[in-house]
Amino acid sequence: MAKVAFIGLGVMGYPMAGHLKTKGGHDVTVYNRTTDKAEKWATEFGGQYASTPAEAAKDCDFVFACVGNDDDLRAVTIGPDGAFSALKSDAIFIDNTTASAEVARELYLAAKEKGCGFIDAPVSGGQAGAENGVLTVMCGGDQDVFDRAKPAIDSFAKFVGLMGESGAGQLTKMCNQICIAGIVQGLSESIHFAKQAGLDVATVISAIRGGAAQSWQMENRWETMEKGKFDYGFAVDWMRKDLGICLKTANDTGARLPATALIDQFYADVQEMGGGRWDTSSLLTRLEKPKGA
């Protein structure tokens, strides 16, 4: 059993922190910007909650974070009352936020100056993966630090891998988001095409789902997409944040992402339709808009 803190109790962080307590058996203290949610978590899982990130991180062996973006991450680490001010020597900070590789490298160096470890460890698998403790975790950092952190991360994961040096976890997550964007757009166009051609979508999916077109998105989203229900996971607003990171990094590295740039604009169309909080499969809605609307 280790002493663990978890900062950020959103749809992902709340169950992830719970698995650290129930499956990992750790002594867990949580912090969240809204205290009510931290209190609720502590009541549900039997842990403690703190009033600041620094208070949560004090004396901990591992400190996890899952917040919104680069600025949020800096705020809870090196900002006023940030966790880094209270890290004990040799503690490890594990960041599960989807953020930039730049902020990962920045915080890696800041942690190293304090004699602590830092792992960028973004996750994939969505809310269901977090709730079921079967996330994929892509890590960047030092091998020895990763080896120490992995048993704790395993509490909420089905796969935990070291992708390379600091920032490599975030870069791998960008690859993940690039793939998802393309797959969801392709699935949206397929469903739209089937409808326009007068085909039964369920019959089409039953024919193609066992072949090369098969994907997680097809298995888990085609039916809700056809029904026009888009409240089943990762929001468009967050996908646009992630794709923005991908496109900026591509510009910095000289990579070419023409399809990703186009699909990012398609998601902007969904936002303009009022769908910022719809899940990412809502790309279908812009295809179903009447022409000229």
Image (cartoon, helix red, strand yellow):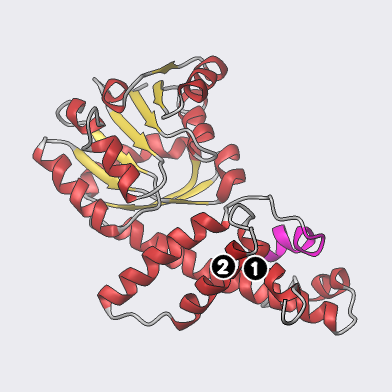
Disc 2 marks a residue whose amino acid type is Tyr
Q: Residue at x 70, y 69 (%)?
A: 284
What type is the residue that disc 1 sits on? Leu
- In the displayed structure image, the side of residue 182 where residue 197 appears, left or right: right
Q: Does residue 272 lie above or below 12 as drawn?
A: below
Q: Is residue 241 visible?
A: yes
- Regarding residue 146, the answer to whether it shows in the image is no
Q: Quadrant of residue 282?
A: bottom right
Q: Which mark is residue 114?
A: none
Please tell me how crowded label 1 is: few (under 14), some (14-19), or many (20+) other residues with Cα within 10 Å.
many
Question: Where in the figure is residue 26, as x and y percent of width and height?
Answer: 41, 22
Q: Mark 2: which secondary structure?
A: helix
Image position, residue 277 (x, y; %): 60, 52
Q: Residue at x 82, y 79 (%)?
A: 194
Badge 2: few (under 14), some or many (20 or more) residues near its Cα, within 10 Å?
Answer: many
Q: Is residue 65 magenta?
A: no
Q: Nearer the viewer, residue 107 or 154?
A: 107
Is 226 one of the magenta-colored residues? yes
Mark 2 highlights which residue? 267
Start-end of magenta stretch: 217-228
Q: Is residue 217 above or below residue 8?
A: below
Task: Name the image quarter holding the C terminus.
Answer: bottom right
Mark 2 to mark 1: distance in Å?
7 Å
- Of 165 and 49, nearer the camera is 49
Q: Which mark is residue 283?
A: 1
